[in-house]
Structures are given as C-alpha cells and as structure tokens.
Image (cartoon, helix red, strand yellow):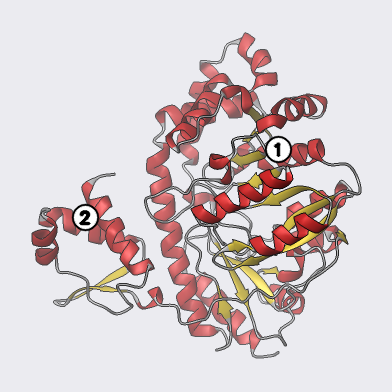
Amino acid sequence: MKRYEQFADEIATLIRQGVLGPGERIPSVRQASRHHGISPSTVFQAYYLLENQGLITARARSGYFVREHARRLLDEPRVTLQPTDPAEVEVSELVFSVLGSLQDDRTVPFGSAFPSPELFPLSRLATSMTRGLRELSPQQVVADMTTGHTDLCRQIALRYMLGGIQLPMEELVITNGAMEGLNLALQCVTQPGDLVAIESPAFYASLQVLERLKLRAVEIPVHPREGIDLEVLAERLETLPIKACWFMSHLQNPVGASLSKARKQALYQLLKQHQVPMLEDDVYAELYFGSTPPAPVKAFDDEGLVIHCSSFSKCLAPGYRVGWVAGGRYAQAISRLKLMTTISPSVPAQAAIADYLQHGGYDRHLRKLRHALEAQQGSMLAAADRYFPAHTRITRPAGGYFLWVEFPEQVDSLQLFNTALDHGVSLAPGPIFSATQQFRHCVRLSYGHPWTQRNERGMETLGRLLTLF
C-alpha cells in the first residue's frame, strides 16, 4: 500500500470502530502532516480517498468531518431463529418465483445477487481474452480441459500463498463457478438422506442444492456480527449424525457476518474433533473493507477437512463462470466427479482471467471496487435511517454488498416483495433464506449498484410501503 492509503486506512479503522464518531472533526491537513510525519499532499490524497469511500465529508472553511451515516442509528438485528428438527428442504418453488420476478432491469435492483457490471473492468478483460486466446496452443485447449488452465491454477495458488496458505496446485480443481464446486463437493461427502449443517439464514442456492440432492438441513443460527453460533453447532455435532457442514465464514450471505480468527480456529477444532468435512463457501473473500484480508478456515486446516470454494464471479467476471475448489483430502474425488459431469469450464475464459491476473492490475481493481462498495453501503444505511420505521434493525457488514434488515414483526416480507415490485423496486424476502421458511419479517437488500437518485427514491418507496403494515 502507498503511504496515503495506509494513512487513510488508519482513519477509516478509527471511524469503523467508533473512535471517531459521526459529525466529529478529523485532524486538519496541517495537524495530520505534523503529527504523522507525512507531507500535506499525502494527507490530502488520503482524505480524498476517504471522501470517495463515503466516510468523511469536507465543509467549506471548517475542515473534514465524519459523515453522519457512519453512526449506527438503527439497531443490530437479533438472532431470531427458532430451534428446529432436521428438515427436508422444499424452497425451490418459492426461490424461483422470487428470482423470476427480478429479471426486469427497470426495477431498482435491491434484490440483485450480483454487483453492477459497471464496477467490473469488462473492456480490460476483453483485451485479456484476446491475448489469452492468441497465446493458447491447440494442445493446451485439450490438456487444460481436465486439469484446469496451468497459468490460472498458478495464479490462484500464488494468491493463497500471499494469504499465508501453502496450497499445492494439485489440490485445485477449476469449476464452472463456485456453485458447481460446492455441488460436486457435497456429492462427494454425502448420500441422499444425510444431515448437513447449514447457516440460518442461509444463501438460498445452498438450500436448493440440498433439496436437489435429497439431503436434510440442520439449521445453525447466525449472529449478525459474530457468525454461526458455535455452541449450537457443538451440541448438534454431538447429538446428530451430521455428515458435512456448509458455511460462509466471511461476509456471510445474506447477513454479512464474519467469524473472527479465534472463532474460525474454534470452528475448525470442532470439525476436527468430529471428523466432519466443511464446505467453506468463500465467494466474497476479496470484498472486505479495510487493508487486511481475513484468513479463511482453510488456513487452519491441517487434515484436509476443509473444502474451500471460491470464484471470480462476485469480484471480477460474473459472466465468465470460472471458480475453483481447494479440495483437501477430497480433491481427487471432486476432480473425478467433475470429469464425469461437465468435464471442464471454458478454457478461453480461464485463459482470459489468467492473463488478467498476471497483467491487468487485479489488486488495483479490487481496491477500487471495495471503496465503491463501502461508499454505496453508507448511502443505503443513511437512506434506511431516513425512510424505514424506527424499530427497524439492520446489519453493518465489514464488506460485501448486502444488508440484512429486520422489520417489526407485523411486516410480511413476501407481501412487501410483491407490493414493492408493483412499485418498481426489488428485494429478497427472508423466507427464501431458510429451510423452514423463517425470517418472514426480514429482507436482504443489495447495495451493489452505484447510488443514484433512482436508488434513493427506491428506499423512500420501501419506507412508504412499510407504513401499510
């Protein structure tokens, strides 16, 4: 990081931790320059960056101040999951009815599962596609179909290494997005009828996978900040024949919770004690706010129990459908199952991403993307405070692009979903995130698109509709 980025990150951390409160004046350029031993131009660059992130604002002849939305005016959601027995999963009809209604690009995209394509370097990726294809030999097209593009595997292994994880390339299986990898991994470690521990609320696609494979869900509650409840998980592992866990340890969808390093270590010790494999769905790994990338549970895995799955869909190239699995002790079984099903992801798409990782400025793009998402989160939080009922509860995740919103209990999110669509606003209703269709008064909102007056009006519309309940 450059010095101005380091200084900006120090100020941002103080704001996120509440040390610098909303409306509070931050050190003047002259004070900061003198106190930190950096030039005034470096301070200016840092403050411009913090402005772009939506954390501070300049006032004429007064200096720089922490923006008002930086304070938590709306409370944090509660852990509202009711204890349930292992459940058959039947959510697909509801999920498909919801997703089918989100296709109209004229609606305000608060229900979207992807960030805006405007945030991705699509033209630069096209250049990488051209160059990658030009350098791809006919022999490689066939050879890379089974093993994955060699340069791409090397780049992914390098990023693991930079994160402190020594991962042999032979453990990597390139897949058609993370979802294929998660499907293959679950098939390798379960049989129909088995119990799988999942988060609740959980990403709806994971519920659909369990439904398709005829697996039963054991719901583990998720705290909005701390992540899965390890005490409940320990009790369930002790008393139920759970065959696998499927968790997001970082920026969990839909809640946005992240486990601390200590809790990740504790989670792994539980898995190790019971010899239960874990699918670590880590597709939002690169979307953290701040300068320090969080380590996945995979970083503590010394027995190959953690099957780490990720992709480039949420941070670089959604349409390319290139993901991967670091399969641990299950890598060979996953690779063989892939060969029995889809054989290979697109080799040209792999070549394009490999070239971009080598030459396209991936880390520069990620910094820009994170700054944009943090500013957009601030705008949505500020709008929620302006327009939503006083007893609304809302998360404030340290990255990603989703907010989990808990409305007063009389609000029916499925009814709100349908009414909001009639008014040109989409959202994701809570019941699609539960095997037992709980969270009826909750919704997931996406701030993954640049904030515009249209988005502001969309939040105002939701606030107005909420008064009808």
Residue furthest to the top: 139
Q: Is residue 102 visible?
A: no
Q: Which mark is residue 45?
A: 2
Against 314, is 175 above or below? above
| Mark 2: amino acid | Gln
Can you give x and y, in whole percent of width and height, for residue 218 in the image? 80, 59
Q: Is residue 466 left or right of residue 368?
A: right
- Which secondary structure lies at badge 1? helix
Can you give x and y, in whole percent of width and height, for residue 419 in the image? 72, 78
Q: Residue at x 29, y 73 (%)?
A: 20
Number of numbered discs: 2
From mark 1 to mark 2, how far is it between C-alphas?
A: 41 Å
* Disc 1 target residue: 181
Q: Quick one: label 1 or label 2, which is nearer the N terminus? A: 2
| Mark 1: amino acid | Gly
Kindly check if marks 1 and 2 are in contact, taking CB atoms under 8 A apart as contact. no
